[in-house]
Amino acid sequence: MLRFTLIICVSSLLLTGNAAAEDSTRPMKFGMVIHGGAGTIDRAKMTTENEQAHRAGLEQSLKAGYDILARGGSSLDAVEAAIRVLEDNPLFNAGRGAVFTHEGTNELDASIMDGKTLKAGAVAGLEHIANPITLARLVMEKSRHVMLQGKGAEAFAKSMGMPFVDQKYFYTEERWQELQKEKASPTPSSGQEKHGTVGAVALDQAGNLAAGTSTGGITNKLFGRVGDSPIIGAGTYANNQTCAVSCTGDGEYFIRAVVAHNISTLLGYKGLPLAEAAQKALDEAARLGGTGGLIALDRNGNVAMPFNTSGMYRGKIGSDGKMTVEIYR
C-alpha cells in the first residue's frame, strides 16, 4: 500500500513538473518579442551597470508595445512604439546610438510590415531622421512605394512633416571610438561583432501580426551600404498566415539567404514548427558565413529566438503581462 502511494505521489510530481514546463512555453494569445542586436556579448566584460542599463532599455521597449496590445491596439502600433524606444536609447545600434560609416557619418535603415495586408515600408541611408521606423511606416501608408532611400526618403519625410535632427544627434563617444579602432585595425571585422540591430514582432488581439527592424548598420561600412534590415523578406517579414520575423546579424548573408521570408515559407509550405523553421533559416545564413540571430512569432503565438553568437539582447511579453529579458546564451 505504501509503495502504491509513493508511485502515485511521484507520478503526480512528474505530471506537475511537465505541466509547469509546458506552461512556461505556452503560446501567447497576444504579445510581442523584441531584440536589440546579436553579436559578441562577453559576460565577463559586461559591467553590472551596463547590463542593468541594457535590460532596462529592453523592458521599457516591451512595456511600450505591450501597453498598446493590452488595450486592444494594433500589432503595427506596438511594433513601431517598441522600436522607437530602442531608437531613442544610445545603448543600441539604431537611431541615437547608430554606428559610424567609414566617412564618420551615420546612415540609418528601417522597415516595417503588416501581416494582415502584406503591405510594407522601408527606408535606407537616412542622415537626419531620429526615428526611421516611423518614416518606414509612413512610406507604407502614405506612398505608393515600398522603399525610399537617401535624399529622396528625407524629402518624403519633410513632406510628411517629420522633424529633422543634426548629425550630432546620433553621436556617442563609444561609437566614435569603435570607428577609430576599426579603421586602425589591419584586419577589419564585419562590424557586427559587438552591435547589431533592433527589432520587434507582435501579435495583437485581433490575430494580426506585424514586424519591424531598425539599424545604424555596421561600423566602418562604406558610404551607401545597405544591409538586410530594410529589405523585406531578408531582415523583416510578416504574414498573418504564417509568422512575423525580425533579424539581426551580418546583413549581406541574411540578404542572400532571404532569412525572414524563408521562415515563413518553411511554415507555409512544409508545415514546420516555428522553432525548427527559424533555426533552419538561420543555419542557412550561417552556412554562407553569416552570424547573428532573429526573433519570430507565429500566428498561434509561438515564439522563437535563435542566434549563433555569444549573445543577443532579447525579450518577450505575453498576454499575461509576464516579461522576460535575456542577453547571454
Image (cartoon, rainbow, N blue to C red):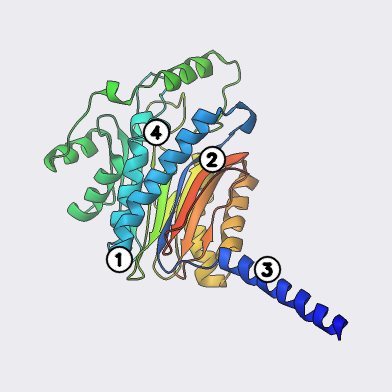
Q: Earlier in the sequence, mark 1 or mark 2?
A: 2
Find numbered disc 2 in the image and state the secondary structure of the residue it sits on: strand
Inspect the image, locate mark 4, and give the three-letter code of the amino acid beneath it.
Gly
Q: Would you call the spot at circle 2 few (<14 residues within 10 Å), some (14-19), or many (20 or more)? A: many
Find numbered disc 1 in the image and state the secondary structure of the residue it sits on: loop
Q: Judge whether 216 appears above or below 297 on screen.
A: above
Query: At 41% across and 61% down in the image, what residue appears?
Result: 31
Which residue does the numbered mark 1 point to in the structure image? 117
Q: Nearer the viewer, mark 1 or mark 3?
A: 3
Q: Earlier in the sequence, mark 3 or mark 2?
A: 3
Q: Nearer the viewer, mark 3 or mark 2?
A: 3
Q: Earlier in the sequence, mark 1 or mark 3?
A: 3
Which residue does the numbered mark 3 point to in the structure image? 17
Q: Residue furthest front?
A: 2
Image quarter hosting the C terminus: top right
Horizontal and vertical percent position of residue 267: 52, 68
Find numbered disc 4 in the image and state the secondary structure of the residue it sits on: loop
The reply, left or right, for residue 4 in relation to residue 11 is: right
Query: At 47% across and 61% down in the image, what residue appears?
Result: 297
Image quarter hosting the N terminus: bottom right
Residue 282 versus residue 48: which sits nearer the camera?
48
Residue 191 visible, this angle: no
Which residue does the numbered mark 4 point to in the structure image? 216
Residue 219 versus residue 255: which sits nearer the camera?
219
Query: At 52% across and 19% down in the image, what residue appears?
Result: 182
Which residue does the numbered mark 2 point to in the structure image? 38
Instruction: Tell me how far mark 4 sits from mark 2, CA to CA.
Output: 14 Å
Instruction: Tell me how far mark 1 sits from mark 2, CA to CA.
Output: 29 Å
